[in-house]
Image (cartoon, rainbow, N blue to C red):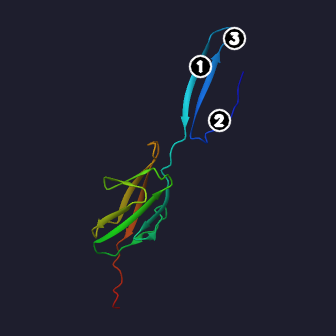
Amino acid sequence: QIADKQIDLTAGSAEISVVVQELGKRSVTYSVAIRVAGSASLESMTINDEVYDPASSASFGLGADPVQVILAITPEDPAATIRIDGATVAAGDPITLNLDSTITEKSFVIESADGLATRTYTIRFDRTPLPDGDS
């Protein structure tokens, strides 16, 4: 006999039990715990209060000089953690980076609260000299 039943995962997890029995023999029950993996997706991000999307191919213009930038990274999962330059940062906390003139990319990782999902994002910086304001 084949059973067909949809399992509801709206609570984030479910316990499934399957009973296997050959006709006239003892039954064996198998139980499996299933849970939905957390999200490592990015909800939004700003660089110096300007919206930036690392999924786009656009570079964020900084000019050629060394510069300090402030990132605000907000994952979809507010309990997710963010790792950048070896440090772990809470969602939404400001991240101050001092970038020398040779840095054109910076990567960060979002890890879901349950540790089941991770995703790496890359910020691209345009280090072309900015126009002189006196021109």
Left or right: 19 in relation to 105: right
The residue sitting at the bottom extreme is 135
Q: Quick one: SS at disc 1?
A: strand
Distance from the alpha carbon under mark 3 to that under mark 2: 27 Å
Residue that label 1 marks: 29
Badges 3 and 2: C-beta atoms under 8 Å apart?
no
Measuring 33% from the left and 64% from the top, which residue is drawn there? 96
Q: Amino acid at mark 1?
A: Thr
Which callout, 1 or 2, points at the residue further toward the start of the chain?
2
The amino acid at mark 2 is Ile
* Residue mark closest to the camera, 3 vs 2: 2
Left or right, 100 with reference to 81: left
Write down the residue under mark 3.
Answer: 23
Please state, as top left, top right, bottom left or bottom right, where the N terminus lies in the image. Answer: top right
Picture coordinates of residue 124, whole percent (x, y): 40, 65
Q: Which residue is disc 2 drawn over?
A: 7
Q: Nearer the viewer, residue 90 or 65?
A: 90
Q: Residues within 10 Å of mark 3 (few under 14, many from 20)?
A: few
Q: Give me the residue at 65% from left, 9% from top.
A: 25
Mark 1 Cα-neighbour bin, 10 Å: few <14, some 14–19, many ≥20? few
